[in-house]
Every structure is written in structure tokens, then in C-alpha cells.
Image (cartoon, rainbow, N blue to C red):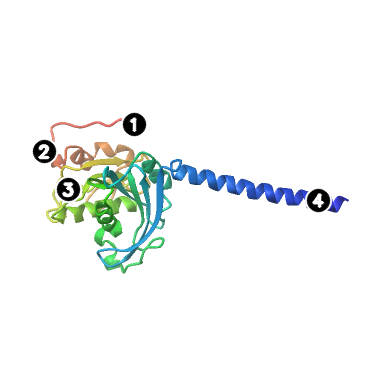
């Protein structure tokens, strides 16, 4: 009898495990779709730069052609993929934003490009912006871009692409763990490259790579925790003014 009871117990455990998996999958789907209020699509498309790109599209059911919604392209950092930012784009979509989480070129299921082409089109982010702008349920006057680390670099590159466009599409930028652009690419002088866009920066006090000022020899002069005291940060906070001409300082606060 003991072997029979053991087999029965094992079978019950298996069914319990399967039931737990099903409940977990249903719960995750419920959260990711905002309780059924968000439609999720797995996209593959050939972009205007003639490359194949992959992304996850989250469309709130409230976004329609009659009531277009604001939209955001979000991007992962280096050596990651479109699932990395899932906490962000799930919450954004639940709050009513059409959200497109991309695999940058050379990542995930998007096409790998030669190094010479990799930085073009915002590593794919600007191609994604143009896709969103063409969707009937997106308000093309309210498109934002955001990314973490290398994804924030893609956002900066996309702003540069947008500045060259006759019909500008990017209205807002949120950079996570990467410096804004402080100077004009040609003159190398301090400038407001973001124009009238809304721009935010999330900066860690002990960031691993960014938010340092350096001397002419490349030596680090200030750590990230002193970022707001640096000329670059003060120029950014004064909308691109040359920091040497500033008579006031802008202070930050810890969150």
C-alpha cells in the first residue's frame, strides 16, 4: 500500500503544481492587460530604414480613432530586450498611454546591423516613433520617448533625428541613468538641443557610468552625487545657457 499512496501523493502534487502555474499565468495576464483593458500585440515590421524590427505594443481599449491617446516608445539598455522595461510599460498602458516597447537593432528579435549603421535612426527608436505616429488611435502631437542607459542614448539620438525632420514628432523625453545632451553637435557649444520639448532626467546618486564631470585629461572631477553642482547640469537646468554666464544656481532635492 505504501508505494500506491506515494504514487497518489506524487500525482496530487503534480496537479497542484499545474494548477498553480495556470493561476499564476492568468494572474500575470490580468495584470499586464490592466484587467482586460489593454490589448497586447507582438509586432514585427520592416521600418522606413529597411530593417526588421520587433516590439510589444500595449494599446488601452480607450485609445480609438475617435479618441486618440498619447503614446510612448520605451527602450531597454545595452544587451537587454523589450521585456526589460515591463514594469514601466505595463503601468503606462494601464494609465491610458499607447506604449511601444522595442527591441533595439541588434537586440532581441530585431535585425542586427553593422556598427556603422547601428546609431542611425536612434538605434531603431525613431523608426518606432514614426510607426506610432501613423497609428489612427495615437495622438501624434503627444508622443514621448524614454529609455534606460543605452535606451536613453537612443532617446537622445532620436531627438537629433527629430530635429532634422520637417514634421517633428517627439513632444517629451525621459532619460533614465544617462546624461542629457549639453552641447551642439557641430559647434560644441552649450545649447538647448531639446527645444520646447518636456524633458526629464532620472539620475542615481551612485550611478555606475554617467553624471560625472571630467577635466581636459579625462580625470573625474565630480562623482554622480554632485551632479547638480556641475556646469553641465546647471546649463541643462537653464535651458542650454553657457554655464560660464550664469549668475544664479538651481538646486535639486532628493527623492
The one nearer the camera, 241 or 146, is 146
Viewer-nearest of labels 4 and 1?
4
Mark 3, other Cα within 10 Å: few <14 / some 14–19 / many ≥20: many
Residue 111: x and y in percent read 35, 66
Which quadrant of the rendered structure holds the C terminus? top left
Where, by quadrant of the figure, is residue 164 drawn? bottom left
Viewer-nearest of labels 3 and 2?
3
Look at mark 1 in the image and give the residue it sits on: 254
Look at mark 4 in the image and give the residue it sits on: 6
Give the label on residue 193, or none: 3
Look at mark 2 in the image and give the residue it sits on: 245
**Tag 2 secondary structure:** helix
Query: Cα distance, mark 4 to mark 2?
Result: 81 Å
Query: Cα distance, mark 4 to mark 3?
Result: 70 Å
Query: Cα distance, mark 1 to mark 3?
Result: 26 Å
Earlier residue among tags 1 and 3: 3
Mark 1, other Cα within 10 Å: few <14 / some 14–19 / many ≥20: few
Amino acid at each position: 500500500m505504501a508505494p500506491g499512496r506515494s504514487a497518489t501523493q506524487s500525482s496530487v502534487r503534480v496537479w497542484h503544481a499545474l494548477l498553480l502555474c495556470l493561476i499564476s499565468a492568468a494572474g500575470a495576464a490580468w495584470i499586464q492587460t490592466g484587467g482586460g483593458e489593454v490589448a497586447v500585440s507582438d509586432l514585427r515590421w520592416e521600418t522606413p530604414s529597411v530593417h526588421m524590427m520587433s516590439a510589444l505594443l500595449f494599446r488601452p481599449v480607450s485609445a480609438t480613432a475617435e479618441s486618440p491617446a498619447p503614446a510612448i516608445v520605451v527602450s531597454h539598455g545595452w544587451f537587454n530586450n523589450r521585456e526589460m522595461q515591463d514594469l514601466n510599460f505595463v503601468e503606462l498602458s494601464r494609465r491610458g498611454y499607447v506604449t511601444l516597447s522595442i527591441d533595439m537593432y541588434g537586440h532581441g528579435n530585431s535585425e542586427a546591423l553593422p556598427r556603422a549603421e547601428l546609431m542611425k535612426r536612434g538605434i531603431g527608436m525613431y523608426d518606432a516613433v514614426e510607426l506610432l505616429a501613423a497609428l489612427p488611435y495615437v495622438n501624434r502631437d503627444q508622443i514621448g520617448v524614454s529609455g534606460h542607459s543605452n535606451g536613453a542614448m537612443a532617446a537622445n539620438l532620436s531627438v537629433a533625428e527629430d530635429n532634422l525632420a520637417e514634421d517633428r514628432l517627439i513632444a517629451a523625453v525621459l532619460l533614465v541613468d544617462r546624461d542629457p545632451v549639453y552641447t551642439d553637435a557641430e559647434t560644441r557649444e552649450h545649447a538647448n538641443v531639446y527645444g520646447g520639448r518636456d524633458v526629464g532626467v532620472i539620475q542615481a546618486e551612485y550611478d555606475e557610468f554617467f553624471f560625472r564631470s571630467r577635466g581636459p585629461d579625462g580625470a573625474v572631477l565630480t562623482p554622480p552625487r554632485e551632479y547638480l553642482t556641475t556646469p553641465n547640469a546647471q546649463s541643462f537646468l537653464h535651458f542650454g545657457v553657457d554655464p560660464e554666464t550664469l549668475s544664479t544656481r538651481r538646486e535639486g532635492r532628493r527623492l
